[in-house]
Protein backbone atom coordinates (compact mmCIF):
# COMPACT_ATOMS: atom_id res chain seq x y z
CA UNK A 1 0.00 0.00 0.00
CA UNK A 2 1.29 3.42 -0.97
CA UNK A 3 -0.15 6.15 1.26
CA UNK A 4 -0.13 9.65 -0.21
CA UNK A 5 -0.98 12.68 1.93
CA UNK A 6 -1.14 16.47 1.76
CA UNK A 7 -0.42 18.64 -1.26
CA UNK A 8 1.47 16.83 -4.01
CA UNK A 9 3.24 19.72 -5.77
CA UNK A 10 6.79 20.65 -6.76
CA UNK A 11 9.34 18.64 -4.77
CA UNK A 12 6.62 16.34 -3.41
CA UNK A 13 5.65 15.40 -6.96
CA UNK A 14 9.28 14.52 -7.63
CA UNK A 15 9.31 12.45 -4.42
CA UNK A 16 6.13 10.60 -5.45
CA UNK A 17 7.75 9.82 -8.81
CA UNK A 18 10.96 8.62 -7.11
CA UNK A 19 8.98 6.32 -4.81
CA UNK A 20 6.88 5.02 -7.72
CA UNK A 21 9.95 4.36 -9.90
CA UNK A 22 11.67 2.46 -7.07
CA UNK A 23 8.53 0.49 -6.15
CA UNK A 24 7.43 -0.43 -9.67
CA UNK A 25 10.02 -3.17 -10.42
CA UNK A 26 9.21 -5.04 -7.20
CA UNK A 27 5.48 -5.39 -7.95
CA UNK A 28 5.95 -8.37 -10.33
CA UNK A 29 2.56 -7.87 -11.97
CA UNK A 30 0.70 -7.36 -8.70
CA UNK A 31 -1.80 -4.52 -8.36
CA UNK A 32 -0.68 -1.50 -6.43
CA UNK A 33 -2.99 -0.08 -3.74
CA UNK A 34 -2.75 3.71 -3.43
CA UNK A 35 -4.37 5.45 -0.46
CA UNK A 36 -5.35 8.98 -1.50
CA UNK A 37 -7.54 9.66 1.54
CA UNK A 38 -5.15 12.23 3.03
CA UNK A 39 -4.60 14.18 -0.20
CA UNK A 40 -5.73 17.80 -0.45
CA UNK A 41 -4.25 18.69 -3.88
CA UNK A 42 -2.24 17.08 -6.68
CA UNK A 43 -0.65 19.13 -9.45
CA UNK A 44 -0.76 18.09 -13.11
CA UNK A 45 2.53 16.18 -13.01
CA UNK A 46 1.43 14.32 -9.88
CA UNK A 47 -1.80 13.34 -11.61
CA UNK A 48 0.26 12.06 -14.55
CA UNK A 49 2.16 9.84 -12.10
CA UNK A 50 -1.12 8.43 -10.74
CA UNK A 51 -2.26 7.74 -14.32
CA UNK A 52 1.04 5.96 -15.01
CA UNK A 53 0.58 3.86 -11.86
CA UNK A 54 -2.87 2.85 -13.06
CA UNK A 55 -1.75 2.11 -16.63
CA UNK A 56 1.19 -0.01 -15.46
CA UNK A 57 -0.40 -1.89 -12.54
CA UNK A 58 -4.18 -1.40 -12.62
CA UNK A 59 -3.71 0.37 -9.27
CA UNK A 60 -6.63 0.46 -6.86
CA UNK A 61 -7.19 3.88 -5.32
CA UNK A 62 -8.69 4.39 -1.87
CA UNK A 63 -10.60 7.67 -1.65
CA UNK A 64 -12.82 9.42 0.86
CA UNK A 65 -13.86 12.75 -0.66
CA UNK A 66 -15.19 13.93 -4.01
CA UNK A 67 -11.77 15.49 -4.68
CA UNK A 68 -9.77 12.31 -4.07
CA UNK A 69 -12.34 10.33 -6.09
CA UNK A 70 -11.85 12.84 -8.91
CA UNK A 71 -8.07 12.28 -8.84
CA UNK A 72 -8.60 8.50 -8.88
CA UNK A 73 -11.14 8.62 -11.70
CA UNK A 74 -8.89 10.87 -13.75
CA UNK A 75 -6.01 8.41 -13.31
CA UNK A 76 -8.25 5.47 -14.27
CA UNK A 77 -9.37 7.21 -17.44
CA UNK A 78 -5.69 7.99 -18.22
CA UNK A 79 -6.73 11.22 -19.92
CA UNK A 80 -3.54 12.94 -18.84
CA UNK A 81 -1.09 11.05 -21.03
CA UNK A 82 0.63 13.67 -23.19
CA UNK A 83 -2.13 16.19 -22.39
CA UNK A 84 0.37 18.91 -21.59
CA UNK A 85 2.95 17.90 -24.16
CA UNK A 86 5.30 16.80 -21.36
CA UNK A 87 4.88 13.08 -21.96
CA UNK A 88 7.17 11.38 -24.37
CA UNK A 89 5.03 8.31 -25.01
CA UNK A 90 7.15 5.82 -23.10
CA UNK A 91 5.68 6.22 -19.63
CA UNK A 92 8.30 8.69 -18.42
CA UNK A 93 7.60 12.36 -18.06
CA UNK A 94 9.94 15.17 -18.92
CA UNK A 95 9.82 18.07 -16.55
CA UNK A 96 9.32 21.53 -17.93
CA UNK A 97 10.41 23.20 -14.70
CA UNK A 98 13.88 24.70 -14.36
CA UNK A 99 16.06 22.73 -11.99
CA UNK A 100 13.61 19.84 -11.68
CA UNK A 101 14.99 16.32 -12.12
CA UNK A 102 14.39 14.69 -15.46
Image (tube, helix red, strand yellow):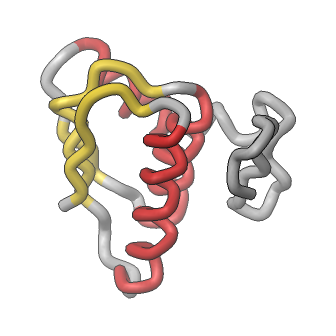
Residue 94 on image: x %, y %: 78, 50
User: In the image, what residue occupies the spot 72% across and 52% down?
Assistant: 93
Instruction: Classify residue 12 by image quadrant.
Output: top left
User: In the image, what residue occupies the spot 43% across and 51% down?
Assistant: 16
The answer to whether residue 9 is visible is: yes
The answer to whether residue 77 is visible is: no
Q: Is residue 73 left or right of residue 18?
A: left
Seen as rendered, the residue at the extreme top is 66
Front-lying residue, 34 or 13:
13
Q: Is residue 25 left or right of residue 101?
A: left
Front-lying residue, 72 or 101:
101
Front-lying residue, 31 or 11:
11
Front-lying residue, 47 or 40:
40
Q: Is residue 27 left or right of residue 81?
A: left
User: In the image, what residue occupies the spot 45% across and 53% down?
Assistant: 15
Residue 18 on image: x %, y %: 49, 62
Query: How many numbered marks have been drawn onto this rendered protein structure?
Result: 0
Q: Which quadrant of the figure contains the C terminus?
A: bottom right
Amino acid sequence: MLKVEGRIVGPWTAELDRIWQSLSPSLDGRKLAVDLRGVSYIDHEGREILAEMYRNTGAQFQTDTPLTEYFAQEARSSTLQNASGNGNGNGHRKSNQKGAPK
